[in-house]
Amino acid sequence: MKIALGADHGGFELKEKIKTHLIKNGYEVLDLGTNSSDSVDYPEFGHAVGYTVAEKKAEFGIVICGTGIGISIAANKVTGIRAALCTNTTMARLTREHNNANILALGGRIIGDILALEMVDTFLTTEFQGGRHEKRITKIENV
Ligand code: RB5
Protein backbone atom coordinates (compact mmCIF):
# COMPACT_ATOMS: atom_id res chain seq x y z
CA MET A 1 0.00 0.00 0.00
CA LYS A 2 1.32 3.45 -0.96
CA ILE A 3 1.07 6.37 1.48
CA ALA A 4 1.69 10.02 0.51
CA LEU A 5 3.31 12.19 3.17
CA GLY A 6 3.46 15.97 3.36
CA ALA A 7 4.46 18.44 6.06
CA ASP A 8 5.61 21.98 6.64
CA HIS A 9 8.50 22.91 8.94
CA GLY A 10 6.23 22.42 11.99
CA GLY A 11 5.59 18.83 10.94
CA PHE A 12 8.92 17.94 9.35
CA GLU A 13 10.42 16.02 12.28
CA LEU A 14 7.28 13.96 12.87
CA LYS A 15 6.99 13.26 9.12
CA GLU A 16 10.49 11.76 9.15
CA LYS A 17 9.59 9.49 12.09
CA ILE A 18 6.35 8.39 10.41
CA LYS A 19 8.22 7.73 7.17
CA THR A 20 10.73 5.45 8.93
CA HIS A 21 7.89 3.68 10.77
CA LEU A 22 5.89 3.10 7.59
CA ILE A 23 8.84 1.76 5.60
CA LYS A 24 9.74 -0.58 8.50
CA ASN A 25 6.17 -1.91 8.39
CA GLY A 26 6.20 -2.62 4.66
CA TYR A 27 4.37 0.42 3.30
CA GLU A 28 5.52 2.25 0.19
CA VAL A 29 6.04 5.95 0.94
CA LEU A 30 5.68 8.89 -1.42
CA ASP A 31 7.36 11.77 0.43
CA LEU A 32 6.17 15.10 -1.01
CA GLY A 33 8.26 17.21 1.41
CA THR A 34 9.17 19.43 3.03
CA ASN A 35 12.69 18.15 3.50
CA SER A 36 14.09 20.37 6.25
CA SER A 37 13.05 22.55 9.18
CA ASP A 38 13.32 25.71 7.05
CA SER A 39 10.14 27.78 7.00
CA VAL A 40 7.70 26.89 4.19
CA ASP A 41 3.99 27.36 3.49
CA TYR A 42 1.76 24.46 4.59
CA PRO A 43 -0.88 24.87 1.81
CA GLU A 44 1.62 23.70 -0.82
CA PHE A 45 2.10 20.38 0.96
CA GLY A 46 -1.56 19.94 1.88
CA HIS A 47 -2.55 20.47 -1.74
CA ALA A 48 0.20 18.17 -3.05
CA VAL A 49 -0.90 15.28 -0.83
CA GLY A 50 -4.55 16.04 -1.58
CA TYR A 51 -4.07 15.84 -5.35
CA THR A 52 -1.93 12.71 -5.05
CA VAL A 53 -4.65 10.89 -3.08
CA ALA A 54 -7.52 12.26 -5.18
CA GLU A 55 -5.75 11.11 -8.35
CA LYS A 56 -5.24 7.67 -6.74
CA LYS A 57 -1.46 7.87 -6.93
CA ALA A 58 -1.53 6.82 -3.25
CA GLU A 59 -4.19 5.00 -1.24
CA PHE A 60 -3.94 7.31 1.77
CA GLY A 61 -2.18 10.50 2.79
CA ILE A 62 -0.76 11.84 6.02
CA VAL A 63 -0.29 15.60 6.42
CA ILE A 64 1.43 17.35 9.30
CA CYS A 65 1.93 20.99 10.26
CA GLY A 66 2.43 22.60 13.66
CA THR A 67 -1.17 22.16 14.74
CA GLY A 68 -2.46 20.02 11.87
CA ILE A 69 -5.16 22.64 11.30
CA GLY A 70 -3.81 24.66 8.38
CA ILE A 71 -2.62 21.68 6.37
CA SER A 72 -5.90 19.80 6.90
CA ILE A 73 -7.88 22.83 5.69
CA ALA A 74 -5.64 23.00 2.61
CA ALA A 75 -5.97 19.27 1.84
CA ASN A 76 -9.75 19.44 2.21
CA LYS A 77 -9.95 22.02 -0.60
CA VAL A 78 -9.17 19.23 -3.07
CA THR A 79 -12.30 17.52 -4.43
CA GLY A 80 -12.67 13.99 -3.12
CA ILE A 81 -10.47 14.55 -0.09
CA ARG A 82 -11.68 13.89 3.43
CA ALA A 83 -8.78 14.94 5.64
CA ALA A 84 -9.33 14.34 9.35
CA LEU A 85 -7.37 16.14 12.04
CA CYS A 86 -7.06 13.64 14.89
CA THR A 87 -5.58 13.91 18.36
CA ASN A 88 -6.20 10.38 19.67
CA THR A 89 -6.57 6.81 18.41
CA THR A 90 -10.35 6.75 18.89
CA MET A 91 -10.69 9.64 16.43
CA ALA A 92 -8.27 7.93 14.03
CA ARG A 93 -10.42 4.76 14.12
CA LEU A 94 -13.80 6.49 13.91
CA THR A 95 -12.83 8.78 11.05
CA ARG A 96 -12.04 5.69 8.96
CA GLU A 97 -15.15 3.77 10.10
CA HIS A 98 -17.62 6.65 9.75
CA ASN A 99 -16.11 9.31 7.46
CA ASN A 100 -14.03 7.09 5.16
CA ALA A 101 -11.27 9.69 5.67
CA ASN A 102 -8.51 9.34 3.10
CA ILE A 103 -6.01 11.69 4.74
CA LEU A 104 -4.90 11.75 8.38
CA ALA A 105 -3.83 15.19 9.63
CA LEU A 106 -1.59 15.54 12.68
CA GLY A 107 -0.15 18.41 14.71
CA GLY A 108 3.60 17.97 15.03
CA ARG A 109 3.73 20.51 17.87
CA ILE A 110 0.65 19.11 19.60
CA ILE A 111 1.04 15.35 19.97
CA GLY A 112 3.86 13.04 21.03
CA ASP A 113 5.62 10.64 18.67
CA ILE A 114 4.33 7.41 20.24
CA LEU A 115 0.72 8.56 20.05
CA ALA A 116 1.24 9.77 16.47
CA LEU A 117 2.56 6.38 15.34
CA GLU A 118 -0.33 4.59 17.08
CA MET A 119 -2.79 6.86 15.28
CA VAL A 120 -1.08 6.18 11.94
CA ASP A 121 -1.32 2.41 12.50
CA THR A 122 -4.97 2.65 13.56
CA PHE A 123 -5.91 4.88 10.64
CA LEU A 124 -4.24 2.67 8.02
CA THR A 125 -5.67 -0.61 9.28
CA THR A 126 -9.29 0.39 9.96
CA GLU A 127 -11.94 -0.24 7.30
CA PHE A 128 -14.81 2.09 6.37
CA GLN A 129 -18.08 0.64 7.73
CA GLY A 130 -20.24 1.81 4.81
CA GLY A 131 -23.98 1.37 5.39
CA ARG A 132 -25.62 4.42 6.94
CA HIS A 133 -22.37 6.37 6.63
CA GLU A 134 -22.31 6.09 2.84
CA LYS A 135 -25.17 8.54 2.19
CA ARG A 136 -23.63 11.11 4.54
CA ILE A 137 -20.37 11.06 2.61
CA THR A 138 -22.32 11.42 -0.62
CA LYS A 139 -23.94 14.56 0.84
CA ILE A 140 -20.46 15.98 1.50
CA GLU A 141 -19.32 15.13 -2.02
CA ASN A 142 -22.39 16.73 -3.59
CA VAL A 143 -21.51 20.26 -2.39
C1 RB5 B 1 3.70 27.45 11.02
O1 RB5 B 1 4.34 28.32 11.89
C2 RB5 B 1 2.33 27.08 11.54
O2 RB5 B 1 1.46 28.16 11.39
C3 RB5 B 1 1.80 25.87 10.82
O3 RB5 B 1 2.68 24.80 10.99
C4 RB5 B 1 0.46 25.35 11.25
O4 RB5 B 1 0.37 25.18 12.62
C5 RB5 B 1 -0.71 26.03 10.66
O5 RB5 B 1 -1.89 25.65 10.86
Image: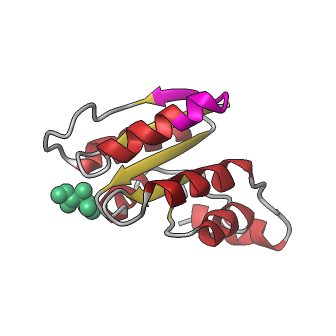
Q: Is residue 23 magenta?
A: yes
Number of marks: 0
Q: What's the residue at 77%, 58% (across, down)?
A: 128
- Ligand 1: image quarter: bottom left
In the rendered structure, which segment of residues is drawn in magenta?
Answer: 21-30
Q: Is residue 126 toward the left or the right of residue 21 in the image?
A: right
Colour setting: secondary structure
| Residue 74 x %, y % | 35, 55
Give whichever of 140, 60 is nearer the camera. 60
Q: Tell me, yes or no, if residue 134 can be seen here.
A: yes
| Residue 121 x %, y % | 65, 50
Q: Is residue 38 toward the left or the right of residue 52 in the image?
A: left
Q: What's the residue at 58%, 51% (across, down)?
A: 120
Q: Tell me, yes or no, if residue 57 can be seen here.
A: no
Q: Is residue 130 toward the left or the right of residue 49 in the image?
A: right
Q: What's the residue at 38%, 47% (across, down)?
A: 14
Q: Is residue 131 magenta?
A: no
Q: What's the residue at 32%, 33% (across, down)?
A: 33
| Residue 16 x %, y % | 39, 37
- When the figure is inspected, residue 28 is found, relative to residue 83, above or below; the finding is above
| Residue 127 x %, y % | 78, 54
Q: Quadrant of the N terminus?
A: top right
Residue farthest along the left direction in this orientation: 39
